[in-house]
Amino acid sequence: MGNMFRSKRFWLIAPAVVYIAFFMALPLMQMAYVSVLERGDYGGVNWGAFSVDAYVNFLFERDLMDNLVLNTDYIQIFVRSFGLSAMTMVFALLLGFPTAFYISMQSQGRRNFLIFLVTIPFWTNILVRNYAWMLLLRNGGLIDGVLNWAGIETGGLDILYTPYAVSIGLTYTYLPFMVLPIYASLEKLDHRLVEAAFDLGADKRRAMKRVILPLAAPGIAAGCILVFIPCLGAYVTPELLGGGKFMMIANLIGSQFGAARNWPFGAGLGFVLLALVLISMLAYSLKFKSLPEEKI
Amino acid sequence: MKVDASNPLWRFRGITSTAMLFFAYLYLPIVILIALSFNENRLATIWTGFTTDWYVVALSNDDMLRAAQNSLVVAVSATVIATIAATLAAMGMSRGRFRGETGVSAMLALPLLVPEVVTAIATLLFFVAIGIKLGLLTIIIAHTVFCIPFAYLPIRARLEGMDPSLTEAANDLYANEWKAFRRVTLPLLWPGILSGAMLSFIISLDDFVISYFVGGAGATTLPIYIFGMIRIGITPEVNAISAMMLLVSIIFVSVSFLIDRIRY
């Protein structure tokens, strides 16, 4: 009986797991394999011909004499991506924590409604959300217009297609991921602990620093990871709000499958990005004994 | 946290104003976009009058309609396959703990963890390697992967909250497994299934990055079409199409949210 039971479970779970294993886990492994292959002369890859060019490529290029020369272009893109992602994470935290705190202090019905409002933009099209910011930020756009109308001559705001625009767009896109996990940990927080701190003479600042923030730490850490990681892999925002001039890692990866036609290099970059994600998830789960996603 | 809001000790400075700023930041772009889609002025920024002309222009654009049709075919196919697989998996996972459960959970969550662009290029390389022609079929296959976890989570949550003694009662009353499923489990589970299916549908309909890479040249979905239009320039027609996409998403998510709240 037990055996039959187990096998029935197996057949229930198998389709979903096998599907994801075949069409996602296997392709990811193949991507790692492609990254150590030679690039084909006309794009594509030479299957079976191994080469570490993709990884050498990241730091060096060959000059006319076939010597390896240090090339910092790609490192710059990585540094920019990490910088923009870190900035976005900080902005999102500054806006997100007070908001999550505010929501957690509302009545049950209001809380549900506000959390619903936080999640709606996540389900809308990412192109449309970024396009809306193009309308706001461009010269002669709404913000520019309002400033001029208020008597501040901008002479053209010139903010669209700059890193500032990308940063505003990234914060906008990933903000909900900061609020949800922080809210989840604040909601579970026992308010009596905070009141005890007050009774023991702590002022608000101290109660926040010594009681609320430490108890919300897993939520804050989860929020930071859930904002930082997708930011690192952002494709649409730099493409639209950066006007393609400010590449981030994902755009560099994408371009290897378009004009640049260097598949092994693209696969290598993809593998590095994936490794960064998995390492930060692992670090989080070792520290907090759960995955950041479980906090949502 | 359940606090007595009237206690002044709980009033932290700047909390309410930051929250207001947050919601303004979140919704201002959406409201402006929808407002501008009804603006008569071609230059889009100055309000000169209300019109629905841009919607008429958008809805009589054959290329746009073809792209929308492609998107629908993809979203419906991916949703059906993903929802069936997810429902079965959720039922399998709900029958108590077992060895390898962590691994199975990790596999089901994998599509949520991997950055979109990495999924996109890995899947593209895979299709090229096994020699499937890129097109709508490859988009459907790739969408089904990331739709499975979105369908799985609400169904699983619904099953967790279900009283196992109900199916046991059905078994005691001589219902066979299939009958117990059809007459007891399914009627209780359908809000979760419907909610999961609607989330899958919307996440597939809205996807751009993965479709863009695995679709090849011929298969243009609506987001790919919109991307092409935005690249060319800001026009009132793009505003109208964008506003329609926004509304479809918001309606679907709201309905899914309401269905999910239906009591057992």
Image (cartoon, helix red, strand yellow):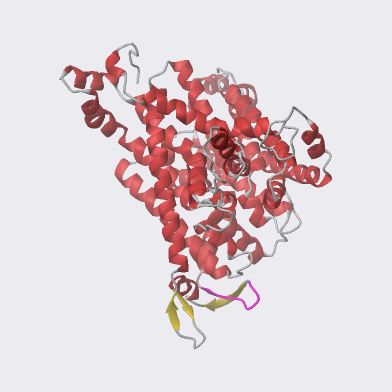
Residue B80 point in image, percent of width and height:
68, 39
The residue sitting at 55% across, 30% down in the picture is: B27
Name the quadrant containing residue A122: top right
The residue sitting at 56% across, 76% down in the picture is: A48
Q: Is residue B19 left or right of residue A234?
A: left
Quarter in which the C terminus of chain A is drawn: top left
Q: Residue furthest top?
A: B6
Q: Is residue B39 above or below residue B162?
A: below
The residue sitting at 37% across, 32% down in the picture is: A97
Residue A100 point in image, percent of width and height:
40, 28
Q: Nearer the viewer, residue A101 or A9?
A: A101
Q: Within the magenta stretch, is there residue B24?
A: no
Q: Nearer the viewer, residue B150 or A54?
A: A54
Q: Residue furthest bottom?
A: A65
Residue A209 point in image, percent of width and height:
24, 31
Name the quadrant containing residue A96: top left
Q: Looking at the image, can residue B102 be seen?
A: no
Q: Nearer the viewer, residue A239 or A57?
A: A239
The residue sitting at 41% across, 54% down in the picture is: A82
For the record, the magenta segment spans A37-43
Q: Is residue A135 above or below residue A67?
A: above
